[in-house]
Image (cartoon, rainbow, N blue to C red):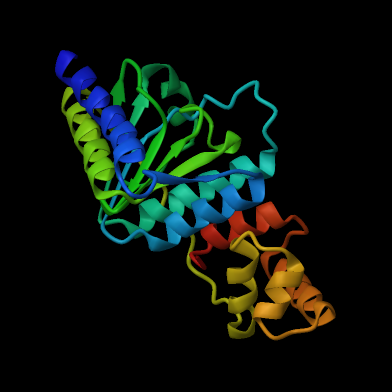
Amino acid sequence: MAESAGSVMLARSAMNRAATEGQRPAGRPVRGARRISAALAGLAASTRHELLTFDDPVASAGCAIPEPFLELAGACMRAAGERAEEVRRIVPRHALPRLEGGLRIPGRARLAEAIPFKMIVVDRTVAAVPLDLELLYNGLLLIRDPVVVQALVRAHHTCWAAAEELTYAVPPPPPPRDLPPQLRPVLDALLSGVTDETAAARLGMSARTYSRRVGELMAALGTTSRFRAGAEAARRGWL
């Protein structure tokens, strides 16, 4: 436990050092449900080799977080887990009933008595940590500084070695359905977090045409909620 705590302190020290001594901040803060959703979707879409997480799936219980946001966050993590060759997820012991109840992500999971903070690390190149260390909905810090990212990876590996292996059956992902090619730019714009006006301008469309395409995308996904649209797109493997 002392070694694990030391690795966590190393990670936090690296973040502070990069922020105070470097020429650039250790990470970029992201706030607002729309931009946070876009950041999570981007992480899921960029995952190729490895996904490391400290995760507490019951941390949001009792918090005023919109259900569509929770659906999107969960779908993004499942999509990232399906893309990654290696998934290592560390969860606190009190979250075990939620895991057994079906909140599962492909890959390996281990139980720890507690986690130091929530965290996502993708391919050892980018990390996301909640600004309050607890809830992504309250804002997150996107970290690309290699020193900080490697310190977080080391903290995770140390905690992983001390945690207890958890085995559960993960149902296979649903068969992918093709995204109509004319809707791909619209989905990318929708998940980027920009306004409709900005998205229409970037795509060279009128606001009316863009709105119509968004409606077509929603119909293809079977939802009228933009948050749920992102979750469904992730579930179908469209990210």
Give percent across and percent down for residue 65.
Answer: 67, 33
| Residue drawn at 30 percent across, 24 percent down | 111
Give percent across and percent down for residue 33.
Answer: 65, 45
Q: Is residue 160 left or right of residue 177?
A: left
Res. 168 in view: no
Count of numbered circles on the image: 0
| Residue drawn at 50 percent across, 40 percent down | 140
Give percent across and percent down for residue 237.
Answer: 48, 64
Q: Quadrant of residue 22?
A: top left
Vertical side of 197 occupied by 120: above or below? above
Vertical side of 171 occupied by 201: above or below? below
* In-front residue for pair 159/232: 159
* Quadrant of the frame with the N terminus: top left
Vertical side of 202 occupied by 234: above or below? above
Q: Is residue 139 left or right of residue 1?
A: right
* In-front residue for pair 19/236: 19
Q: Is residue 85 left or right of residue 228?
A: left
Q: Is residue 21 left or right of residue 102?
A: left
| Residue drawn at 74 percent across, 84 percent down | 205
Res. 128 in view: yes
Q: Residue furthest right?
A: 208
* In-front residue for pair 104/147: 147
Give percent across and percent down for residue 164.
Answer: 23, 23
Q: Quadrant of residue 197?
A: bottom right
